[in-house]
Image: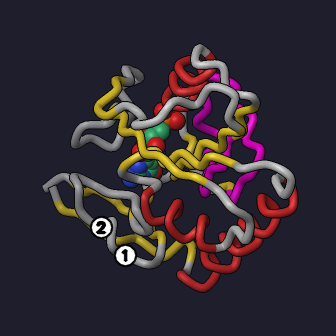
Amino acid sequence: MIEKIEKVLLKESEIQKKVKELGEKISEDYKDTLPHLICILKGASIFHSDLIRNISIPLTIDYLSVSSYGDKTESTGRVHLVKDLDNPIKDRDVIIVEDIIDTGYTIEYLLNLFKLRKPRSIKLCALLSKPSRRRVPVKIDYLGFEIPDAFVIGYGLDFDERYRNSPDISILRLIEE
Ligand code: 5GP
Protein backbone atom coordinates (compact mmCIF):
# COMPACT_ATOMS: atom_id res chain seq x y z
CA MET A 1 0.00 0.00 0.00
CA ILE A 2 1.41 3.38 -1.02
CA GLU A 3 0.40 6.46 0.98
CA LYS A 4 0.13 9.61 -1.07
CA ILE A 5 -0.58 13.13 0.20
CA GLU A 6 -3.01 14.17 -2.52
CA LYS A 7 -3.38 17.84 -1.63
CA VAL A 8 -3.37 20.29 1.23
CA LEU A 9 -7.02 20.90 2.09
CA LEU A 10 -6.59 23.46 4.88
CA LYS A 11 -3.44 25.47 5.43
CA GLU A 12 -2.05 26.22 8.89
CA SER A 13 -2.99 29.92 8.57
CA GLU A 14 -6.64 29.13 7.69
CA ILE A 15 -6.91 26.68 10.58
CA GLN A 16 -5.39 29.13 13.07
CA LYS A 17 -7.77 31.90 11.93
CA LYS A 18 -10.79 29.63 12.41
CA VAL A 19 -9.60 28.39 15.82
CA LYS A 20 -9.24 32.02 16.94
CA GLU A 21 -12.82 32.78 15.82
CA LEU A 22 -14.17 29.70 17.62
CA GLY A 23 -12.28 30.68 20.79
CA GLU A 24 -13.69 34.20 20.68
CA LYS A 25 -17.25 32.90 20.19
CA ILE A 26 -16.93 30.45 23.10
CA SER A 27 -15.42 33.20 25.32
CA GLU A 28 -18.48 35.37 24.61
CA ASP A 29 -21.10 32.60 24.97
CA TYR A 30 -19.66 31.28 28.26
CA LYS A 31 -18.60 34.56 29.87
CA ASP A 32 -20.74 34.04 32.99
CA THR A 33 -19.79 30.40 33.54
CA LEU A 34 -16.74 28.16 33.92
CA PRO A 35 -16.78 25.93 30.82
CA HIS A 36 -15.22 22.48 30.98
CA LEU A 37 -13.55 21.60 27.68
CA ILE A 38 -13.20 17.86 27.14
CA CYS A 39 -10.60 16.79 24.59
CA ILE A 40 -11.29 13.56 22.73
CA LEU A 41 -7.87 11.93 22.34
CA LYS A 42 -5.81 11.65 20.38
CA GLY A 43 -7.13 13.34 17.26
CA ALA A 44 -8.43 16.50 18.95
CA SER A 45 -5.31 17.08 21.07
CA ILE A 46 -3.75 19.80 18.88
CA PHE A 47 -7.08 21.52 18.18
CA HIS A 48 -8.00 21.47 21.89
CA SER A 49 -4.69 22.95 23.00
CA ASP A 50 -4.88 25.73 20.40
CA LEU A 51 -8.57 26.37 21.13
CA ILE A 52 -8.20 26.78 24.89
CA ARG A 53 -5.39 29.31 24.35
CA ASN A 54 -7.81 31.35 22.24
CA ILE A 55 -10.43 31.38 25.01
CA SER A 56 -10.02 34.42 27.22
CA ILE A 57 -12.25 33.40 30.17
CA PRO A 58 -11.45 30.94 33.00
CA LEU A 59 -12.04 27.30 32.06
CA THR A 60 -11.15 23.75 33.07
CA ILE A 61 -10.10 20.80 30.90
CA ASP A 62 -10.16 17.03 30.87
CA TYR A 63 -9.23 14.22 28.46
CA LEU A 64 -11.00 11.12 27.28
CA SER A 65 -9.86 8.53 24.80
CA VAL A 66 -12.04 6.39 22.56
CA SER A 67 -11.21 4.11 19.70
CA SER A 68 -13.19 2.99 16.67
CA TYR A 69 -10.81 3.12 13.71
CA GLY A 70 -7.83 0.80 14.26
CA ASP A 71 -5.40 1.11 11.38
CA LYS A 72 -8.08 1.42 8.69
CA THR A 73 -9.58 4.53 7.16
CA GLU A 74 -13.16 3.35 7.66
CA SER A 75 -15.08 3.59 10.92
CA THR A 76 -15.96 0.23 12.46
CA GLY A 77 -19.07 1.77 14.03
CA ARG A 78 -18.07 0.09 17.30
CA VAL A 79 -16.80 2.66 19.76
CA HIS A 80 -15.06 1.75 22.98
CA LEU A 81 -13.71 3.73 25.88
CA VAL A 82 -9.92 3.57 26.22
CA LYS A 83 -9.48 6.23 28.94
CA ASP A 84 -12.30 7.79 30.96
CA LEU A 85 -12.40 11.36 32.31
CA ASP A 86 -10.41 12.12 35.47
CA ASN A 87 -13.07 14.40 36.96
CA PRO A 88 -16.86 14.35 37.39
CA ILE A 89 -18.95 16.53 35.04
CA LYS A 90 -22.10 16.73 37.17
CA ASP A 91 -23.53 20.28 37.02
CA ARG A 92 -20.71 21.41 34.70
CA ASP A 93 -21.06 23.31 31.41
CA VAL A 94 -19.35 20.80 29.16
CA ILE A 95 -17.97 21.46 25.70
CA ILE A 96 -16.82 18.32 23.89
CA VAL A 97 -13.90 19.12 21.60
CA GLU A 98 -13.64 16.71 18.64
CA ASP A 99 -11.36 16.63 15.63
CA ILE A 100 -13.87 15.41 13.05
CA ILE A 101 -17.46 14.22 12.85
CA ASP A 102 -17.73 11.53 10.21
CA THR A 103 -20.46 8.88 10.60
CA GLY A 104 -21.44 10.42 13.95
CA TYR A 105 -21.21 7.13 15.86
CA THR A 106 -18.41 8.30 18.16
CA ILE A 107 -20.12 11.51 19.23
CA GLU A 108 -23.46 9.71 19.66
CA TYR A 109 -21.73 7.28 22.03
CA LEU A 110 -20.04 10.12 23.95
CA LEU A 111 -23.19 12.22 24.29
CA ASN A 112 -25.10 9.22 25.66
CA LEU A 113 -22.28 8.49 28.11
CA PHE A 114 -21.94 12.10 29.31
CA LYS A 115 -25.68 12.77 29.64
CA LEU A 116 -25.92 9.96 32.21
CA ARG A 117 -23.50 11.98 34.38
CA LYS A 118 -25.90 14.94 34.54
CA PRO A 119 -23.87 17.93 33.32
CA ARG A 120 -25.65 21.31 33.49
CA SER A 121 -25.23 21.75 29.74
CA ILE A 122 -23.40 19.97 26.96
CA LYS A 123 -22.27 21.34 23.60
CA LEU A 124 -20.11 20.10 20.77
CA CYS A 125 -17.19 21.88 19.15
CA ALA A 126 -15.71 20.08 16.13
CA LEU A 127 -12.97 21.31 13.85
CA LEU A 128 -14.16 19.30 10.83
CA SER A 129 -17.36 17.68 9.60
CA LYS A 130 -18.03 15.35 6.68
CA PRO A 131 -21.82 15.74 6.35
CA SER A 132 -22.09 13.40 3.36
CA ARG A 133 -20.89 10.49 5.51
CA ARG A 134 -23.33 10.90 8.39
CA ARG A 135 -25.18 7.78 9.62
CA VAL A 136 -26.76 9.38 12.70
CA PRO A 137 -27.85 13.03 13.03
CA VAL A 138 -25.44 15.27 14.95
CA LYS A 139 -25.88 18.88 16.08
CA ILE A 140 -22.53 20.68 15.98
CA ASP A 141 -22.71 23.87 18.06
CA TYR A 142 -19.27 25.20 17.05
CA LEU A 143 -17.89 24.02 13.72
CA GLY A 144 -14.63 24.86 11.99
CA PHE A 145 -15.00 23.52 8.44
CA GLU A 146 -17.23 21.25 6.39
CA ILE A 147 -15.10 19.02 4.17
CA PRO A 148 -15.84 16.54 1.36
CA ASP A 149 -15.80 12.76 1.72
CA ALA A 150 -12.04 12.14 1.82
CA PHE A 151 -9.64 10.74 4.40
CA VAL A 152 -7.69 13.58 5.98
CA ILE A 153 -4.56 13.73 8.10
CA GLY A 154 -2.59 16.39 9.99
CA TYR A 155 -3.27 18.84 12.82
CA GLY A 156 -3.79 15.91 15.22
CA LEU A 157 -5.42 13.56 12.72
CA ASP A 158 -3.50 10.38 11.96
CA PHE A 159 -3.19 7.49 9.61
CA ASP A 160 -1.78 4.52 11.50
CA GLU A 161 -0.62 6.93 14.27
CA ARG A 162 1.46 9.06 11.88
CA TYR A 163 1.01 12.57 10.38
CA ARG A 164 -0.48 14.09 13.58
CA ASN A 165 2.36 16.64 13.70
CA SER A 166 1.61 18.25 10.35
CA PRO A 167 0.40 21.86 10.89
CA ASP A 168 -1.79 21.62 7.73
CA ILE A 169 -4.69 19.26 7.02
CA SER A 170 -4.26 17.19 3.85
CA ILE A 171 -6.07 14.49 1.91
CA LEU A 172 -4.35 11.10 2.10
CA ARG A 173 -4.87 8.62 -0.70
CA LEU A 174 -4.01 4.95 -0.30
CA ILE A 175 -2.95 3.22 -3.46
CA GLU A 176 -2.87 -0.60 -3.74
CA GLU A 177 0.50 -1.81 -5.02
P1 5GP B 1 -17.22 8.90 13.43
O1 5GP B 1 -17.53 8.05 14.63
O2 5GP B 1 -17.97 10.19 13.39
O3 5GP B 1 -17.39 8.09 12.15
O4 5GP B 1 -15.69 9.18 13.44
C1 5GP B 1 -15.11 9.96 14.38
C2 5GP B 1 -13.65 9.67 14.53
O5 5GP B 1 -13.10 8.94 13.43
C3 5GP B 1 -12.89 10.96 14.58
O6 5GP B 1 -12.81 11.45 15.89
C4 5GP B 1 -11.55 10.57 14.00
O7 5GP B 1 -10.71 10.09 15.02
C5 5GP B 1 -11.86 9.45 13.04
N1 5GP B 1 -11.96 9.96 11.66
C6 5GP B 1 -13.08 10.16 10.93
N2 5GP B 1 -12.78 10.64 9.71
C7 5GP B 1 -11.43 10.74 9.67
C8 5GP B 1 -10.50 11.20 8.67
O8 5GP B 1 -10.82 11.63 7.55
N3 5GP B 1 -9.19 11.16 9.03
C9 5GP B 1 -8.74 10.70 10.23
N4 5GP B 1 -7.44 10.72 10.44
N5 5GP B 1 -9.59 10.28 11.19
C10 5GP B 1 -10.92 10.31 10.91
Q: Residue furthest top?
A: 116
Q: Is residue 174 above or below residue 14?
A: above
Identify which residue is drawn at 39% across, 47% down.
41
- Crowding around mark 1 (Cα neighbors within 10 Å: few <14, some 14 to 19, many 20+) is some
Magenta residues span 124-145
39 and 104: which one is in front? 39
Residue 54 - label: none
Give the left or right position of residue 137, taking residue 128 as reference: right
Give the left or right position of residue 69, taking residue 36 as reference: left
Give the left or right position of residue 177, taking residue 76 as reference: left
Image quadrant assignment for residue 155: bottom left
Residue topped by disc 2: 163
In percent of width and height, residue 124 lies at: 68, 41
- The kind of residue tagged 1 is Ser
Residue 135 in the magenta stretch? The answer is: yes
In percent of width and height, residue 17 lies at: 69, 79
Tell me whether the residue at label 1 lies in contact with that at label 2, contact meaning CB atoms closer than 8 angstroms: yes
Q: CA distance from mark 1 to mark 2?
A: 6 Å
83 and 140: which one is in front? 83
Image quadrant assignment for residue 134: top right
Identify which residue is drawn at 68% across, 55% down.
146
Identify which residue is drawn at 60% across, 85% down.
13
In percent of width and height, residue 113 lies at: 53, 19
Image quarter hosting the N terminus: bottom left
Image quarter hosting the C terminus: bottom left
- Crowding around mark 2 (Cα neighbors within 10 Å: few <14, some 14 to 19, many 20+) is some
Residue 25 in the magenta stretch? The answer is: no
Give the left or right position of residue 57, taking residue 3 as reference: right
Residue topped by disc 1: 166
Q: Is mark 2 within 8 Å of ligand 1?
A: yes
